[in-house]
Image (spheres, grey):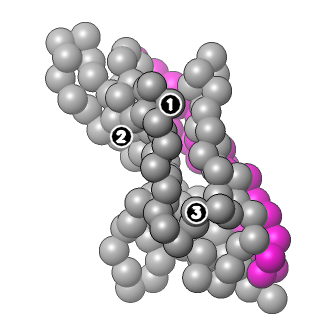
């Protein structure tokens, strides 16, 4: 089984910064992609940023230039550096992992989510 544990959320003032972390553990074979998604109250879950096994990055237009996704391959840990935070960034942030098992079957896992609140 695979587990994803997020940390780093909290309350921050507009213009502030936060760094989210997501530590993956368990039977992890071939990672295709890791990413961050978020869900605000009353809204659908949306992509924030992803990073592929080859290092390709993808960001939502709303966070480009403010957020940076990165990973530590040795620790199988994903990060999201969030700068210049805005009230509209308030949401529960979820870590996502897409991988293939030893039979090359595609599997997907989600973390439990961490709350980010941007408010003065």
Name the residue at 64% across, 27% down.
Answer: 72
| Magenta segment boundaries in residue numbering | 4-27
The residue at which mark 2 appears reads as 109
Mark 2 closeness class: few <14, some 14–19, many ≥20 residues within 10 Å? some
> Is 76 situated above or below 68?
above
Q: Foreground mark, 1 or 2? A: 1
Mark 3 closeness class: few <14, some 14–19, many ≥20 residues within 10 Å? few
Q: How many marks?
A: 3
**Where, quadrant-wise, is the N terminus in this rendering?**
top left
The answer to whether mark 1 and mark 2 are in CB contact below 8 A is no
Whether residue 94 can be seen here? no
Mark 1 closeness class: few <14, some 14–19, many ≥20 residues within 10 Å? few
Of residues 103 and 72, the one nearer the viewer is 72
Tell me the CA gap for discs 1 and 2: 19 Å
Name the residue at 68% across, 80% down.
Answer: 86
Decide which of tag 3 and tag 1 comes sooner along the chain.
Answer: 1
Residue 71 lies, in percent from the top left, at 61, 33
The residue at which mark 3 appears reads as 64
Decide which of tag 2 and tag 3 comes sooner along the chain.
Answer: 3
Name the residue at 59% across, 21% down.
Answer: 73
Name the residue at 75% across, 64% down.
Answer: 83
Residue 55 got which mark? Answer: 1
The part of the image, by quadrant, that contains residue 47 is bottom left
> Is 53 situated above or below 90?
above
Residue 26: within the magenta? yes
The part of the image, by quadrant, that contains residue 109 is top left
């Amino acid at each position: 089984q695979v587990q994803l544990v997020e940390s780093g959320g909290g309350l921050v003032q507009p213009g502030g910064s936060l760094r989210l972390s997501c530590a993956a553990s368990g039977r992890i074979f071939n990672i295709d992609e890791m990413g961050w998604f978020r869900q605000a109250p009353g809204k659908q879950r949306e992509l924030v940023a992803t990073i592929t096994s080859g290092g390709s990055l993808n960001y939502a237009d709303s966070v480009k230039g403010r957020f940076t996704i990165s990973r530590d391959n040795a620790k199988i840990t994903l990060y999201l550096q969030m700068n210049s935070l805005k009230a509209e960034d308030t949401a529960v942030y979820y870590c996502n992992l897409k991988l293939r098992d030893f039979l090359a079957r595609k599997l997907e896992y989600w973390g439990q989510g961490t709350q980010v609140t941007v408010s003065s």
